[in-house]
Image (tube, rainbow, N blue to C red):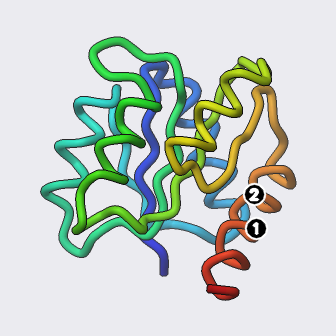
Amino acid sequence: KTRILIVDDMMTMRKLVAKSCREIGLTDLVEAKDGADGWSAVTSASPPFGLIISDWNMPNATGLDLLKRVRADSRFGKTPFILVTAEAEQSQIVEAAKAGVSQYLVKPFTTELLRERIESVYQKIAGR
């Protein structure tokens, strides 16, 4: 029943992430075209999102920008956040970790890899 926000500037990628989510039984999906649109969706969502899956590289506001805004806001700061990117640079992974990312997923990915990342996020929450 988790409500999920999928943020990516490429519609094809949003559809691929949504398809993978549906394949693992997650069906309450909302899409946003960039980090700015994603932030608007986060702040107006009712009920709030239980997970954000965002691309890193986007115009207007990047996934990292969105992550930092979410983490800085006490209303949404604990929302699980998965960054999806084609970049596997160690420095970017470190930067995302410092910003409080819950998980990191490198493109291209499989539905099974997405499932593993989502399960890992919720295992961390359960372990708090």
Image location (x, y in percent) of residue 21: 63, 57
Disc sitting over residue 82 in the figure: none
Name the foreground residue: 25 vs 40. 40
Image location (x, y in percent) of residue 88: 79, 22
Real-space Cα separation, disc 1 to disc 2, in angstroms = 5 Å
Q: Which residue is mark 2?
A: 117
Q: Which residue is mark 1?
A: 120
Q: Is residue 47 shown above or below 34?
A: below
Query: Counting other residues with Cα less than 10 Å from the Cα at mark 1, is it few (<14), some (14-19), or many (20 or more)?
Result: some
Query: Counting other residues with Cα less than 10 Å from the Cα at mark 2, is it few (<14), some (14-19), or many (20 or more)?
Result: some
Name the foreground residue: 48 vs 125. 125
Q: Is residue 72 shown above or below 108?
A: below
Q: Residue at x 55, y 24 (%)?
A: 12
Q: Is residue 33 shown above or below 96?
A: above
Name the foreground residue: 24 vs 64. 64
On-image quarter of the C terminus: bottom right
In the rendered structure, are the residues bearing label 1 and label 2 in contact, judged by CB atoms less than 8 Å apart?
yes
Q: Quadrant of residue 3?
A: bottom left
